[in-house]
Image (cartoon, rainbow, N blue to C red):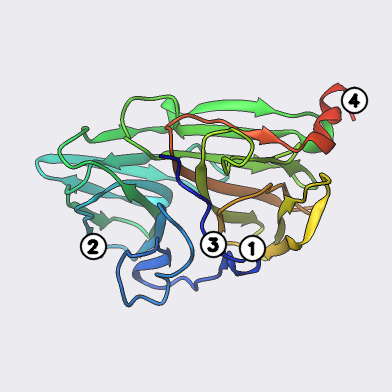
Amino acid sequence: MSTKPAPIALADTLFRVPRQPGITPLQLRKGSDAGSAAGSTGANLLSSWRLLLAPGEGASFVRHDEEVILILERGQGELQVGAESFTVSRQGIFAEPATALYLPPGQKLSVRATSTLEAILVSAPAEAGVGDIHLVTPETVRVVPRGRGQYAREVHDIFVADPHPQRLMVGETFNPPGNWSSFPPHKHDGLDGEPYLEEVYVYAIDPPTGFGQQILYQNGEDGSPRSDACVAHVVRDGDAVLLPFGYHPVAAPPGYRLRYLWVLAGDERRLSLYEDPAHRWIHDHGSE
């Protein structure tokens, strides 16, 4: 049975959660962690948290009915899962590709920071007893250039075309200053025959004092954007946006690099998208 897009207003899809020590929810799926202020966001499948530790600090994390991926954003530390231990490090989001760890449901993760460590944790419902722990290192991240001209960007596949997660797909997209991505605008809400995929973006800006723009819109029957289903979020370093349905292009302003971590889960574990027919012509428009 196809999952349906969550009933949420696009204006309510931006989550700006200040950085604070420990594990902090960014957004939680409906029915998850009842009572949390982040827990009625309209997400059907995806939840996300930020982990921030000072040198020498530790934290633990487990989801009994969900698979989890930790994506390291900066710092050094030790990851412990049962008898397995991993020493991980990342100079920074814009300095090198990611290190990421996949955990099947019920696996308890313990993290100990040896320098200031920041990571994002994401989860989705999954079947218990299926899958194995798997570490992705920078040299195994698949880096793919996409687009051209002012919509050229670099896409990093972290957990995408692999056999490890049951539902989750995770990667990073890097926009050079002034460039667009997720362009031509695409969607994967299942309303035009494509498989349904819910998505969350988490942004980083370089320098971090800058901003980016996240547009979300849905077309009407005449093929033009609906005035009641169109929003443009100004996104800042550390923000998250839920993409429950519709098209979702991203723009970086001049002078600022933008990265968004993307996390998907849905009816099938494969990337499948539907481009806005009004903008497909750009594929044949030379190098502009």
Gap in angstroms between the C-alphas marked 3 and 1? 9 Å
Q: Which residue is mark 1?
A: 10
* Residue 6 x/y as whole percent: 51, 57
Side of 116 relative to 186 (left or right): left
Nearest-to-viewer mark from 4 and 1: 1
- Residue at figure coordinates x 40%, y 46% from the top left: 71
Q: Secondary structure at mark 1?
A: helix
Q: Which residue is mark 4?
A: 285
The image shows residue 187, relative to residue 203, as above or below, that is above
* Marks 2 and 1, the one that precedes in the sequence: 1
**Amino acid at dot 4:** His
For the question of whether residue 220 can be seen, the reply is yes
Q: Is residue 266 left or right of residue 230?
A: left
Mark in front: 2 vs 3 = 3
Check if mark 4's residue and mark 3's residue have beta carbons within 8 Å. no
Return the disc, 2 or 3, that comes first in the chain's sequence. 3
Secondary structure beneath dot 2 equals strand
Residue linked to disc 3 = 7
Tell whether 232 sits left or right of 122: right
**Marks 2 and 4: which is nearer the front?**
4
Amino acid type, mark 3: Pro
Q: Which mark is residue 58?
A: 2
